Amino acid sequence: MKIQESAENYLEAILVLKQRNGQVRSIDVAHYTGFSKPSISRAVGLLRDNGYVSIDQNGLLGLTESGLHIAETIYERHTVLTELLTLLGVSPETAAEDACRIEHVISTETFEKLKEHARRHRSDAAQ
C-alpha cells in the first residue's frame, strides 16, 4: 500500500529516534521533524489507525511490522542516496536534504541499481 510522503517521514523519524534513544514519544518526533506537537499527535493517530504505529500505556511509540518495513525502506534509501550524492561532491547538508526528497519518488528498479553502484564503489575504494 502506498502511503503519503509525510507519513513515510514520520515513520522514518520514529525508527531513527528509536535507534538513537531506545524509546520515542510524540514530542520527540515533533522536535526531530520541527512540526508542532498537535500536528504530530494527529499524524501518529492516523498512523496508529492505519496499522503502522503502536502506542503503549506510557505513550511510547513503536512501529508495527508494516510500519517498520516502510521506515526501514525509506531510511535505507535516505542513507544510500545521501552517500552517493556526497561522493559526487554535493555538500553533506544538501545531499541529506535532496535525498529526503528523492527517497519518496525514486523507483525500486533505479534505487536498486544505485545501491549496486554504491556497493561496487565501496569495494573498489577498499582495495
Image (cartoon, rainbow, N blue to C red):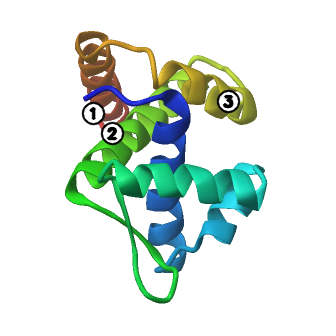
| Residue type marked 1 | Ser
Residue 66 in the image: above or below residue 94: below
Q: Residue at x 44, y 15 (%)?
A: 105
User: Is the N terminus in the top left, top right, bottom left or bottom right quadrant?
Assistant: top left
Question: Residue 39 or 12: which is nearer the viewer?
Answer: 39
Figure label count: 3
Marks 3 and 2, the one that precedes in the sequence: 3
Residue 112: x, y in percent?
24, 20
Dividing the picture into quarters, in which one does residue 55 lie? Answer: bottom left
Circle 1 residues within 10 Å: few <14, some 14–19, many ≥20: few
Marks 3 and 2, how far apart at CA: 27 Å
| Residue type marked 3 | Glu
Question: Residue 40 or 126: which is nearer the viewer?
Answer: 40
- Image mark for residue 17: none
Marks 2 and 1, how far apart at CA: 5 Å
Marks 1 and 3, how far apart at CA: 26 Å
Residue topped by disc 1: 123
Residue 38 in the image: above or below residue 43: below
Residue topped by disc 3: 97
Q: Nearer the viewer, mark 1 or mark 3?
A: 3
User: Is the C terminus in the top left, top right, bottom left or bottom right quadrant?
Assistant: top left
**Circle 2: element type:** helix
Question: Residue 40 or 86: which is nearer the viewer?
Answer: 40
- Image mark for residue 126: 2
**Circle 3: element type:** helix
**Circle 1: element type:** helix
- Tell me whether the residue at label 2 lies in contact with that at label 1, contact meaning CB atoms closer than 8 angstroms: yes
Q: Residue at x 32, y 12 (%)?
A: 107
Give left or right: position of 59 versus 123. Answer: right
Give left or right: position of 21 versus 120. Answer: right
Q: Residue at x 52, y 81 (%)?
A: 59
